[in-house]
Amino acid sequence: MSIEMHSRRRFLVGSASAATLTAFGTGGLSSLSAFATPSRLSDDGGSFVPYGAAVRSDALSADSSYREAVIVNCQLVVPESELKWLELRPAPDQYRFGKADAIIDFARQNGIRVRGHTLAWYGALPKWTESIATRADAERELTDHIETVVSRYKGAIPSWDVINEPLVDWPESAASLRPSIWARRLGPDYLRLALKATAAVDADAQLVINEYDVEYAGARFSAKRSALVQLLRSLRDRDVPLHAVGLQAHLFAGRTIDRDGLQSLLTEIKALNLDVLITELDVIDRELPSEIHERDKLVADLANQFLGAVHEVIRPKAILTWGLSDRYTWVPIYFKRRDGMPNRPLPLDADLKPKPLFEVIEQFRHRA
Ligand code: G3I
């Protein structure tokens, strides 16, 4: 490594260590992660596609080596759960911002940008929302929540997953909305309401609709791609504010990437003058061989296939993985491996060492 790079890396580590003293208490940087990102580059025509990861406030607070790996590897972070209703809204008249504030303070101290996830979803809702009885109540609750949360973080969160996973798994059309209190009380209008409420509070925020399972071959996934395009078109036709589509990209090893299907979706998204973000990339490795080097390579190959197909059509505004390290991943909640071995879905292993997947993302980020 050249001296210059070394000194810049040391500088970066130094500034990060000073910063971490405030956001999550004391805790220096014991060792630099292998892939220090030399600078935080803009995604507005910058020379690299920014990379980031979902982060957990408890891990950032308790685990200094993980915190350091986030600081030196991520230009972006997204709270994995701290901005969801379940975390923010313990009761109808209560907001609980502590954990989200801690992540945003950490990010600010370390020159890392933050994505917001998520404002309108069927998931992670507190029980009291089930008692929202009327259309008027639902409109008030959803609008008040968005106004309160988005205004609190205006300027700190420039991009929001306003709508998360709006469609059922095998939709017949854009009308096949995932059952939720919002869809039940407001019908498809909840999407327009949520997007307009967010834009009304923060006119500069990037408004995103985030979806999964649009990457694969198969009738179910083709149906989801078609319904998503129909949904996007209907919003566009009614001039509903929207800037980008988030492809979650939870890639399942064992499924086949539908290159043509994915690329025609991306072509339609581009034609609607919408940007694309890769928002939750990881590889569910439950069906892959136990041998770690072979498994890591297959994980990287699948991500490479996906990112390569995307890159031929559009340059994403950002790539985020749903977690940085295998030390903290959601995958075993639902997809534990039959051999009992830990899942390995993310760019860094549980010891924060880069894997082939990190290399794939790095190479993709640097393509013109
Ligand atoms: O915070 C509580 C903790 O106090 C409690 O002791 C513990 C055990 O019950 O639960 C903790 O809450 C968990 C939360 O994650 C925070 O760790 C919830 O049970 C658990 O259901 C929740 O799972 C999250 C899930 O979304 C539901 O919100 C996953 O971590 C998170 O990775 C996952 O992320 C989703 C995206 O939002 C949308 N796209 C799919 C993605 C993966 O499912």
Image: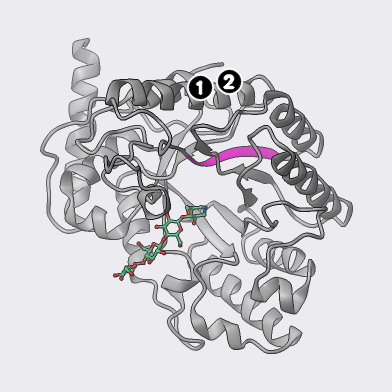
Q: Quarter-wise, where is residue 177 in the image? A: bottom right
Q: Identify the mark at residue 304; answer none if there is no mark.
A: 1
x 43%, y 81%: residue: 90
Q: Which residue is mark 2?
A: 308
Residue 358 position within the rendered picture, expressed as x and y whole percent measured from the top left? 37, 26
x 50%, y 71%: residue: 85
What stretch of residues is rendered in magenta? 275-281
In the figure, is residue 40 to the left or right of 260?
Answer: left
- Which quadrant of the rendered structure holds the C terminus? top right
SS of the residue under disc 2? helix
Q: Is residue 48 visible?
A: no
Give the Cα distance between marks 2 and 1.
Answer: 6 Å
Q: Identify the mark at residue 263; answer none if there is no mark.
A: none
Q: Is residue 190 visible?
A: yes
Q: Please state which amino acid type lies under the numbered disc 2.
A: Gly
Q: Are marks 2 and 1 in contact (CB under 8 Å)?
A: yes
Q: Quarter-wise, where is residue 289 in the image? A: top left
Q: Main secondary structure of the magenta part?
A: strand
Q: Please state which amino acid type lies under the numbered disc 1.
A: Asn
* Number of on-image labels: 2
